[in-house]
Amino acid sequence: MKWRDAALGLAATIVIWQILAMLLNRNVFPPPTIVLVVFVEEIGRELGWHFLVSGWRVLAAIVLAVLTAVPIGLGLGQTPTLNRVFSPLIYIAHPIPKIVFLPIILILLGAGDVSKIFIIGIILFFQILVVVRDEATQLRPELLLSVRSIGAGRRALFRFVYIPATIPAVLTALRISVGTAVAVLFFAESFATTSGLGYYILVESWGALRYPQMYAGVLAMSLLGLLLYFVIDALDRRLVPWREQP
Amino acid sequence: MTSIVELNQITFIYPGGAIIFDDFTWHINRGEAWAIIGASGCGKSTLLYLMAGLRQATAGQVRVDDQPIARPRPQTGLILQDYGLLPWATVRDNAALGLEIRQFYGPDGKHTPRNELFSDKKERVQYWLTRLGIDHVAGHYPNQISGGQRQRAAIARTLALNPDLLLMDEPFGALDALTRENLQRLTLELRAERQLTTVIVTHNIDEAVYMGQKILVLPQPPTSRPLIVDNPQAGERGYRRTETFFNRCNRLREMLEEPVS
């Protein structure tokens, strides 16, 4: 998406928000003018801190998921026997909403960052695992053989075949699942914690009836999702130029 | 004439236990044009992969250019029926891939010849794109060009590495008759131009007689003794329409059909 389109979308959102706020005229739905002022005030203080905490949790989860799912996906995709053994398991495990395990994860991993990173990580893990595996299955043995024949050893195969073959799959998986990741983050931060945007929105603001602050938190959470999406989009355009070809 | 490939008492057994070669000895001299022909399962591709260093013999030794082969040798080119092009790279980038890989390793003598220069990389790739007539599709991706053009891109990629030995496994098997004949003629021209030693594996009798000055016939495995047909006229203009060509095709057909004692 172009920056101009993004700015246009943002402007439209603010206009619609303003109109709705005027129509409803209740303090649970403050107009953007008030919220934006609060947002600017808060972002330099507490909100900024919570934003960074949430951002770190999602990023850590993304990094962990990529680092574990990509090698496993490549391995499964390149080893038909392994894939035959594990694919029923993945087939069953993939559609289970992992968020339902949050209580167990909290018991096992505690209430700190680890449990939150883990729950987001595991959701991303399955998304990435499945697309990378499917991508690796399509890498034909003839392709690997002929690239080896022109001198590629293991390192060059990774550099010239496996990594470029996987990057688009990883980016597609992230693009699809980054929204889910932020949503799950919100839920995971809504209890048993004292930091993160979920905590800020639900406990600090909603619980204390500070509605403009709550909306500032919602805005921060949206920005976090949007920012991640932009980064993935930019990476995709830079790293996958052949995708734009017809 | 010195030999470039030597197979000394090779035994090759498939993981399933089938013996394909049993104490097989054979050699290729520098500059020769060989064709290897046989029915499927006779081990002709295996033989090529042994020479390419992509498979290892169960027993015996494969030597290329006086060195035992344990891994692909940088001066050996391999062309497969499947082209083996990277789907995410343009024709130009695919043609440059071999040189990119060499640059990645640097002139270590193992992946890359010690005397490799990278300064003329662009020009070398450009030369081969032009020579193979695919310059106009250099910016296209493999799925946007024809099968013949893809094989030309694969050949460009291999020749840009200045090989002295070119191994081809059913290179034109997936192409239509006209494209196949064009590429056969082009391969013969390039062989003469670059003084290449060529080995083409095929199941097509016509192709074997057209391309191979010497033809190795592989009957049913296991093979112990090389069965060689001399065919010095291969590569001559208009050979395909001569009586000798016709007779030699018939002879090969008989050899492949008859069980050899």
Image (cartoon, helix red, strand yellow):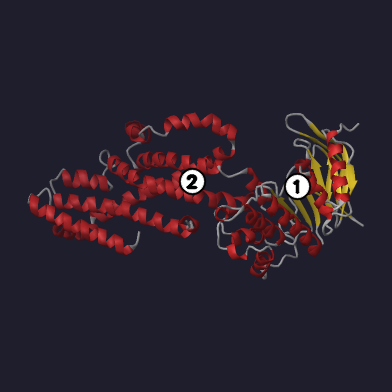
Q: Residues within 10 Å of mark 1 (few under 14, many from 20)?
A: many
The chain letter under disc 2 is A
Check disc 2: other Cα within 10 Å, few if <14, some if 14-19, many if 20+: few
Q: Nearer the viewer, mark 1 or mark 2?
A: 1
Identify the image quadrant of the N terminus of chain A. bottom left
User: Measured from the top left, where is residue B184 in percent x and y?
Assistant: 75, 55
Residue marked by disc 2: A67
- B11 up-or-down from A47: above or below: above
Q: Classify B255 as above or below A47.
A: above
Task: Classify residue A223 by image quadrant.
Answer: bottom left
Q: Is residue B6 visible?
A: no
Residue occupying image coordinates x 67% and y 59%: B157
| Amino acid, disc 1 | Gly
Between B261 and B95, the residue placed more toward the observer is: B261
Q: Total of numbered circles in the picture? A: 2
Residue that carries the numbered disc 1 in the rendered image: B53
Residue type beneath disc 2: Leu
Left-right relation of B214 to A1: right
In the picture, the disc for residue B189 is: none
Q: Is residue A193 left or right of residue B22?
A: left
Q: Residue at x 19, y 51 (%)?
A: A215
